[in-house]
Image: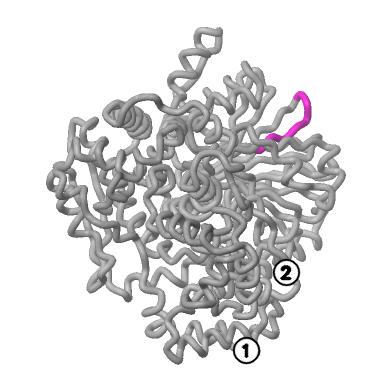
Amino acid sequence: MCGLAGLLRPRNDLDQEHLCALAASMGEALHHRGPDDGGVWADPQAGIALAHRRLSILDLSPLGHQPMASADGRYVIAYNGEVYNFAELREQLLGLGHGFRGHSDTEVLLAAVSQWGVEAAIARCNGMFAIALWDRERAELWLARDRVGKKPLYYGWAGDTLVFGSELKALWRHPQFDNGVDRDALALLLRYDYVPSPYCIHADTWKLAPGALLRLDAAAIARGPGAHDPARDQQRYWNAAERMRAAIADPFDGDIDAAEDRLDELLREAVGLRMVADVPVGVFLSGGTDSSVVTSLMQALSAKPVQSFTIGFEGSHHDEAPLALEVARHLGTAHTELYVSGGDALEVVPRLPAMFDEPFADASQVPTALVCKLARDLVTVALSGDGGDELFFGYKRYERALRNLSLLHRVPAPLRRWLAGRARDHGEASRAGGFAAFAAEMGARGIGDVYRNRIVRWRFPQAAVPGARLPPTLYDLAEPLDGRGTAADAMMLADYGVYLPDDLLCKVDRASMAVGLEARAPLLDTQVAEFAWSLPLHYKRGDDGDSKHLLKRVLKRYLPDAMVDRGKRGFGAPVSQWLRGDLREWAQALLAPDRLRAQGYFDADLVHGLWRAFVDGEKRWHTHLWNVLMFQAWHEHWRAQRDRAGDALIRATSGEGGL
């Protein structure tokens, strides 16, 4: 796993030294993502520079060094990720006359682009990746991201220069990146706990969407930031909604025994591909269904005990460590567990803004950071169970939303409209249950609206961020699948397209990369996903309402029934307890009314009023407050970084050459 950064200027007015210095600084900000090696490449005539930080996983030799040029010299790449089917592609390319100096997947990817072109080559790749590719012949920059969004890629404007990188901290290093807070993105943060793609917390800055390509040439750069529309300019080479609709139209025609056999086969292949590495590989094991499936298959495919890792929480009802230990002992893994106290967890909180760069408020980021640090002591790659809930009907909230949809259909339309109008009068109190919450549900146009009401934090974030509007996401569609499939399919699609890449995978990427650990998610293999979408709902949701029914049937091939048939505990954090205890003074300072008014982002009276209500005993406000606090802590960190970049600009412009 690695980190990439770069810039493309509208003019060739910087020499090799200046371009390389800028790119090197941006790349160095990502040192944690790639501590093993670093490189810079620049072409002053084209105004392009690429930087790379390398975490060596395949081909540990210098032959894997990046940025890397294709054999014919036409393409130069800076690439973050893994192409799991690189061996298969390599064999095809050898048959077509290509030769290889080393055995890295980067060299294979470049040969694939040379042979088939950018779009066709990317479409052949099964993997997780973010790519910056310069075509020297056509003077074009290509940015690409994997299908599900495992690896991040930001891009935006620093003055009239396009800058891009794996994390925002790379963009911040450019002295002219002075983009302020996008208020609309801030409203999205309050609604979801994260900023969904393609939006970004900064103005004139975006995230490349999962499964997207972006092509930029001199004309696009010359038009500047005002002319860019990510919805128009980002082209999808793979679209989850289209693929799910196709799978629903061509359903799996076998019985549940045949489905179990096929899923076991697909998962074995996906896990096996992700165990390929020239460094030690382990697995995160929580004891739940998803991580237990991955661990079981890893151990079945391994000739020696697999390294498994679990974090336990002292005195917490969320603690899954005993379940994980039971699974590890049955499978015979080399298990490592670490029990942490509340104090250990709280030590992570001050590091979160630097770890995530963009404000991010899923509080399970704390235990995720702890388990990544634990694993990095023994392995360089760790497999995770991410994706099982979104593909196999794993969340309890799916059942609640289906129940609410059924109730909605029993209420006459005129009465629904009247009740929905009353809900807005209650504001955020409609999150608290009772009549206000019931009334808020009545405005739903379809399953998309019903489900969004189940997952949002702030129901009306525009009230907290004056002047903001809410940009659309997949969650805003009344029917995410246009009425095809079931309501359950529509909810799983929305989570797969938004929550999974922008919350869960973002969380694991930042927490793992912060310690130089690569995380891989076999359940998110494209073949597994498309197979899951082809299955009837009752294969996932058992007759007795059991979630992940088929996945559990596969797991029972490796574990006793008693280890499989137990409730989901989750991987949470006691935020309410923290805010009433050790974090109270920290929160009080960040939410002080004078501070909020001076910054000008929030309605100070509304936000501080929720803080006072929480302190006075209203428990329900901790989630609302946590995402405000994560923004406030991030803002403090970002301002400090911006001040440093401003100092760098003063130093640079006082000498020879401009930026």
Question: Is residue 354 something one can see in this rendering?
Answer: no
Element class at badge 2 = loop
Residue at position x 69%, y 58% from top? 471
From the image, tell me which residue sits under label 2.
468
Q: Which residues are magenta?
A: 137-143
- Decide whether residue 647 is among the magenta residues: no
- The image position of residue 403, as x and y in percent, is 43, 58
Q: Quadrant of residue 466?
A: bottom right
- The tag earlier along the polypeptide, 1 or 2, is 2
Q: Is residue 321 above or below residue 124?
A: below
Residue 481 lies left or right of residue 156; in this view the side is left
Residue 185 lies left or right of residue 225; in this view the side is left
Q: Is residue 628 above or below residue 379?
A: below
Residue at position x 46%, y 41% from top? 1
Residue 457 lies left or right of residue 597; in this view the side is left
- The image position of residue 552, as x and y in percent, is 26, 42
* Tag 1: amino acid: Pro
Q: Nearer the viewer, residue 504 or 96?
A: 504
* Tag 2: amino acid: Ala
From the image, tell me which residue sits under label 1.
593
Q: Nearer the viewer, residue 354 or 31?
A: 354
- The image position of residue 422, as x and y in percent, is 63, 76
| Nearer the camera: disc 1 or disc 2 | 2
